[in-house]
Image (tube, rainbow, N blue to C red):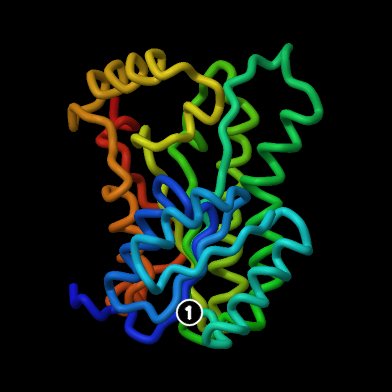
């Protein structure tokens, strides 16, 4: 792949301050993007990420709200005036048994994992150029049953449906839509969900032992596929969800 694959392009990556989003944003920047808008709710993490490359543009925004979507649109208008690639990476996970779920816990996961991508895409669609790309970060949880993860799994199943539906709807506009479905990746998501560090490491060890690849994923395992799906050489791929899980779904 050429280092300038995304030369002069403008990208948006939600949840771009940490984890997969941060790795993807940096990958786009390193491959020549003129500007990569990274969004999130925490200024500190966004600024830390932006310090790693001059093309990264931090925008504090809650993209589950019209105001947040407007802030992202304003940043695009200011930097380049058009959008080439939109990556929906922002997401949350809460491991909560069914009998302990309340309305707030349900809404939080559905809002961030589903409502946010819908509202932001609708708002940015007029700025997305013909030949542009949308990539959504789903999860193998969309196809796995897990105690305590019913709402998260349902939200990611919804993301898979968005990929397929938008690929059909936006194809005539010259816009491709694809997704990636990671297995367990070493990111802050479990810690943010409230899992103690020791429990996170125990879970990583168990996961690594349970998959053919023998390890958990890295953010670069996923970010490389996000950029690959958005590059011109993938121009005949749309509506696909690429599983990247070390073989977890095979066993």
Left or right of residue 146, residue 24 in this image: left
> At 62% from the left edge and 45% from the top edge, which residue is drawn?
113
For the residue pair 108 and 62, the one nearer the viewer reads as 62
Spot occupied by residue 201 in the image (x, y as percentages of width and height): 33, 19
Report whether 249 appears left or right of 41: left
Kindly indicate the quadrant of the structure image that contains residue 100: top right
Q: Nearer the viewer, residue 143 or 8?
A: 8
**Local crowd size for mark 1, using a 10 Å CA cut-off: few (<14), some (14–19), many (≥20):** many
Image spot of residue 85 (x, y percent): 47, 73
**Residue 239 visible, this orientation:** no
Say what secondary structure mark 1 lies in: strand
Q: Quadrant of the C terminus?
A: top left
**Which residue is rendered at x = 64% and y = 14% of the image?**
97
Q: Quadrant of residue 24?
A: bottom left
Task: Tell me: residue 89, above or below residue 234.
Answer: above
Residue 244 at what x, y percent from top left? 32, 44
User: Does the rendering let one see residue 32?
Assistant: yes
Q: Is residue 65 left or right of residue 92?
A: right
Q: Position of residue 203 (x, y in %)?
A: 36, 18
Instruction: Name which residue lies at 66% across and 75% down.
Output: 73
Outermost residue to the right: 103
In the displayed structure, 197 sits above or below 14; it is above
Corner quadrant of residue 33: bottom left
Relative to residue 226, is residue 74 depicted above or below? below
Please report the residue visible at 48 percent of the width from the left and 57 percent of the height from the top: 47
- In which quadrant of the rendered image does the N terminus lie? bottom left
> What count of labels does the image hold?
1
Depicted 149 relative to depicted 167: above or below? above
Q: Nearer the viewer, residue 118 or 10?
A: 10
Name the residue that disc number 1 marks.
Answer: 84
């Amino acid at each position: 792949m050429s280092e300038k694959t995304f030369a002069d392009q403008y990208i948006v990556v939600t949840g771009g301050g940490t984890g997969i989003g941060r790795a993807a944003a940096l990958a786009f920047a390193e491959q020549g993007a003129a500007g990569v808008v990274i969004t999130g709710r925490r200024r500190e993490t966004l600024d830390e990420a932006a310090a790693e490359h001059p093309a990264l543009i931090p925008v504090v925004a809650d993209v589950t709200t019209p105001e947040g979507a407007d802030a992202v649109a304003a940043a695009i208008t200011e930097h380049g005036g058009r959008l080439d690639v939109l990556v929906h990476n922002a997401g949350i996970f809460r491991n909560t048994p069914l009998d302990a779920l309340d309305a707030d816990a349900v809404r939080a996961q559905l809002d961030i994992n589903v409502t946010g991508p819908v509202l932001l895409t609708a708002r940015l669609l007029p700025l997305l150029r013909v030949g542009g790309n949308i990539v959504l970060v789903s999860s193998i949880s969309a196809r796995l049953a897990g105690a305590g993860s019913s709402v998260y799994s349902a939200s990611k199943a919804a993301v898979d449906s968005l990929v397929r539906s938008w690929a059909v709807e936006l194809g005539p506009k010259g816009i491709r839509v694809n997704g990636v479905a990671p297995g367990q990746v070493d990111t802050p998501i479990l810690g943010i969900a409230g899992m103690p560090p020791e429990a996170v490491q125990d879970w990583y060890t168990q996961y690594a032992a349970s998959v053919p690849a023998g390890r958990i994923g890295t953010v670069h395992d996923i970010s490389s596929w996000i950029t690959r799906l958005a590059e011109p050489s993938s121009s005949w791929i749309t509506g696909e969800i690429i599983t990247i899980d070390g073989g977890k779904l095979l066993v």
